[in-house]
Amino acid sequence: MKFLDEAKVFIRSGDGGAGAVSFRREKFVEFGGPDGGDGGRGGDVWVEAVNGLNTLIDYRFQQHYKAGTGIHGMGRNRTGANGASVTLKVPVGTQIFEEDNETLIIDMVTEGQRFRLAAGGNGGFGNAYFKSSTNQAPDWANPGLPGQEKTIWLRLKLIADAGLVGLPNAGKSTFLATVTRARPKIANYPFTTLHPNLGVATIDGREFILADIPGLIDGAHEGVGLGDRFLGHVERTRVLLHLVSAQEENVGQAYKIVKHELNAYGGGLEDKPEIVALSQIDVLDQAEIKKKAKELQKACGKPPLLLSAAAHMGMTEALRALRDVIVESAGETALPDRSQHHADNADTDEDDA
């Protein structure tokens, strides 16, 4: 299924049905009178967040949604049927914006959440409604009220507990594939990942959702490469795992490039808790690992984790570090802290291999 995280949609609620002008005329009935029924109400347009969707691809093929029109009233005091409503089903995490793509209407953050985007028009009153002691035979009825129409934007921001960021080929997709059942495309060239991927990781009986987004490069906030359009998918995360490849010539500069892009994007990413890890350490010897770990520590201000998803080194420690931040931010009781695979413990990497 192709990934699509933004769509423009036209919606229109149904018009109300017109009231009827009718008079009762029956043989052997002494008194007649008005008996025109009311028109039915037009259908509404709703949006609902549902489970099992992670893309807006359905709205690429259908951009117009119109609710049903109310049925007109009829004689013998018969009220017209209401028009059928329409429901737009969207993934959890979808935001609905006005046509300017800036004014937020609703943020669909919980499964089953429903919101009425456009109300149907009320049906008109039939002439029976207007009968009174001073007007025994009204010969008019109300037309139905028109429905509402508007153009809206749907913008998806995936809901995940942790997000993976880094330069292209930093090992993010390999990390995701190793710790979850997700199967992102993995290859030895930049921008293998072209759209975000989600997976569920489990550590010590605790599950959390992990999001992998395409790599960032210098100038991404100005549209270079794939730009920063996918950073919205890690805005809702509680923690970021920043992977820096040990194959980079200057790991400190590699870290600063991505950090600069996160700060330039904003959206709260600049203040989000961050765990830094030196990845792909299986390609270096211990001396090089220690050297690059110190360079990275100098750039980020804290000892980085050391890991290799391909060789399954340091993965448990990374998952536990993510889990601890997630449970703490959620107000849960964190599990006892275990020894982490920091740079000052680099000598223990051989035991993990």
Image: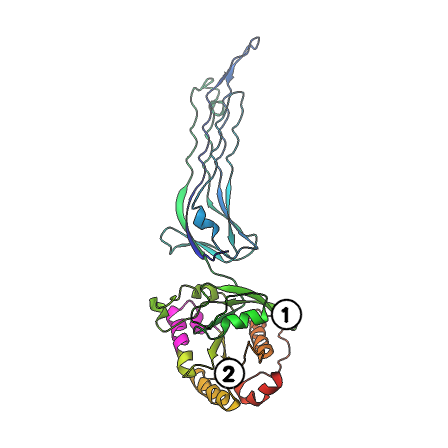
Q: Position of residue 101 (x, y in %)?
A: 38, 55
**Residue at the (44%, 47%) spot, across then down:** 61
What element does badge 1 sit on?
strand
| Residue picked out by circle 2 | 283
Residue 239 seen in the current view: no
Which quadrant would residue 313 be assigned to in this image?
bottom right
The image's colouring method is rainbow
| Residue picked out by circle 1 | 206
Q: Please report contact status of discs 2 and 1: CB closer than 8 Å, yes or no.
A: no
Q: Position of residue 129 (x, y in %)?
A: 49, 25
Describe residue 22's horizontal placement relative to residue 201 as left or right: left
Q: Position of residue 14 (x, y in %)?
A: 45, 37
**Could you say which is closer to the camera, residue 309 or residue 40?**
309
Please identify the residue farthest to the top as the structure is shown.
28
Q: CA distance from mark 2 to mark 1?
A: 31 Å
Q: Residues within 10 Å of mark 2 (few under 14, many from 20)?
A: few
Give above or below for 65 relative to 268. above
Which quadrant would residue 181 be assigned to in this image?
bottom right
Q: Position of residue 241 (x, y in %)?
A: 50, 74
Q: How many marks?
A: 2
Principal secondary structure, stretch drawn in magenta: helix
Quadrant of the rendering where the C terminus is positioned: bottom right
Please identify the residue farthest to the bottom as the structure is shown.
287
**Could you say which is closer to the camera, residue 86 or residue 306?**
306
Give above or below for 35 relative to 216. above
Q: Residues within 10 Å of mark 1 (few under 14, many from 20)?
A: few
**Residue at the (49%, 65%) spot, across then down:** 236
Query: From which residue to which does the magenta span run?
Result: 257-272
Please identify the residue farthest to the left as the structure is shown.
222
